[in-house]
């Protein structure tokens, strides 16, 4: 991703900034859509992973739909080329205004997460003289075997409708004239690298789908969400996830009935590896038993290590000295503002440039101005080569 020419240009750019390799993004989008297309699967990009307008425009141009979790995400999607008829809207706490926006635009489906939400959507749709297309977000009780903060498919999670509520759901639906049940929606978590988890999901989807069909409800859409992980440890060796193996699990184990469509909501798998956070070393400080490389990026720019204790590979782009170990830390007034401990780097000095890799997902989109710090800017590969 980084050659001498790119690194030389980085020296003149104020840090920190996000660098996006748009060629890698295009290659990843192509690989995913090609493998999904072999089986007629439909794709909706999860905007929560990265809502950068340039990235959204490229993804919409590649023919993807959108998976949104807020009204502002719906607005961003439509502003950057996504067809409202290919937008799914999830979230346990949709406001009335957000629901009205979705109804006005005529999106493909509101993914409903509770019986009370069904009642509210029906009431709002009635007032607008519309009929709302909905999918039921189901809790399949499948363990994603990932970080507890990004697990969403267990009974104790806040998301979705539980199987013991199904009878009540169907009875309630009979009384709601302004709802049209279009599908079933499942999403069990994020950064899943064990494909057996998706096999377990398939079996639960089959069981639940068959239950609805046996009760004279025929979902047109089966939406199995996203969750496919990326290789944070070796991003250079594995820049594009194994989409073929991923989709083959569903081809082998999902039992579609009649003309049912299978939908997916990839996010991190599409954009995670195309982005890096570029930061400059401010000071190198010797502690009692470690060296600190203090950089100008902070947890406000990339919160994943502080929030999830997640690993990101860190590379020194401007040194070729002997290997030393450093704790790479930021300037934010929190001890959790640490990107990596005992990181092996070439001998690192003030003004060296570091790349924090695999930051294209849940990096820029989760940034804040904590400590009143400026937001990191974005730089793009084509801009660099042409600039």
Image: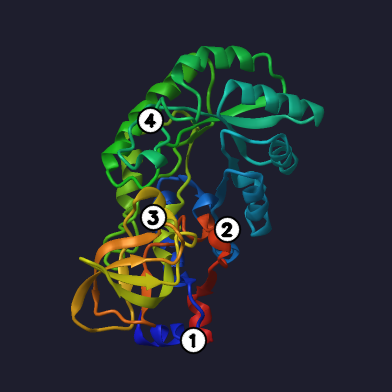
Residue in front for this viewpoint, 370 or 203: 370
**Residue at x 63% of width, y 53% of height:** 77
Helix, strand or loop at label 4? It is loop
Helix, strand or loop at label 2? It is helix
Mark 3–mark 2 distance (CA, rounded to whole Å): 36 Å
Q: Earlier in the sequence, mark 2 or mark 4?
A: 2
Q: Earlier in the sequence, mark 1 or mark 3?
A: 1
Mark 2–mark 4 distance (CA, rounded to whole Å): 29 Å
Q: In the image, is residue 297 above or below residue 268?
A: below
Mark 1–mark 3 distance (CA, rounded to whole Å): 29 Å
Q: Which mark is residue 60?
A: 2
Q: Earlier in the sequence, mark 4 or mark 3?
A: 4
Mark 4–mark 1 distance (CA, rounded to whole Å): 55 Å
**Residue at x 68% of width, y 51% of height:** 75
Residue underneath mark 4: 255
Residue underneath mark 3: 336
């Amino acid at each position: 991703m980084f050659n001498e020419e790119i690194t030389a240009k980085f020296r003149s750019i104020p840090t920190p900034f996000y660098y996006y390799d748009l060629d890698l993004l295009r290659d990843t989008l192509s690989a995913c859509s090609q493998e999904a297309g072999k089986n007629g699967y439909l794709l909706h990009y999860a905007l929560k992973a990265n809502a950068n307008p340039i990235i959204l425009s490229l993804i919409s141009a590649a023919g993807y739909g959108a998976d949104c979790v807020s009204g502002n995400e719906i607005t961003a999607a439509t502003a950057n080329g996504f067809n409202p008829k290919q937008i799914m809207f999830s979230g346990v706490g949709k406001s009335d205004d957000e629901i009205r926006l979705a109804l006005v635009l005529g999106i493909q489906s509101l993914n409903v997460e509770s019986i009370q939400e069904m009642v509210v959507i029906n009431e709002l749709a009635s007032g607008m003289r519309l009929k709302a297309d909905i999918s039921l977000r189901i809790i399949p009780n499948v363990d994603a075997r990932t970080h507890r903060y990004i697990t969403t498919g267990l009974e104790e999670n806040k998301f979705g409708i539980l199987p013991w509520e199904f009878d009540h759901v169907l009875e309630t639906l009979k009384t709601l004239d302004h709802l049209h049940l279009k599908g079933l929606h499942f999403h069990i978590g994020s950064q899943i690298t064990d494909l057996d988890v998706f096999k377990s999901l398939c079996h639960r989807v089959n069981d639940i789908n068959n239950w609805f069909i046996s009760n004279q409800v025929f979902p047109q859409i089966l939406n199995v969400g996203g969750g496919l992980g990326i290789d944070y440890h070796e991003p250079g060796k594995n820049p594009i996830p194994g989409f073929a193996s991923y989709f083959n699990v569903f081809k082998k184990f999902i039992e579609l009935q009649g003309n049912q469509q299978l939908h997916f909501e990839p996010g991190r798998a599409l954009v995670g590896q195309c982005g890096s956070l570029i930061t400059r070393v401010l000071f190198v400080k010797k502690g009692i038993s470690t060296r600190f490389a203090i950089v100008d990026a902070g947890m406000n720019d990339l919160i994943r290590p502080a929030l999830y204790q997640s690993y990101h590979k860190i590379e020194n782009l401007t040194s070729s000295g002997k290997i030393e170990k450093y704790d790479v830390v930021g300037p934010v007034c929190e001890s959790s503002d640490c990107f990596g401990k005992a990181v092996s780097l070439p001998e690192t000095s003030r003004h060296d440039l570091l790349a924090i890799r695999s930051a294209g997902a849940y990096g820029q989109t989760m940034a804040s101005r904590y400590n009143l710090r400026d937001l990191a800017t974005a730089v793009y590969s084509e801009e660099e080569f042409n600039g």
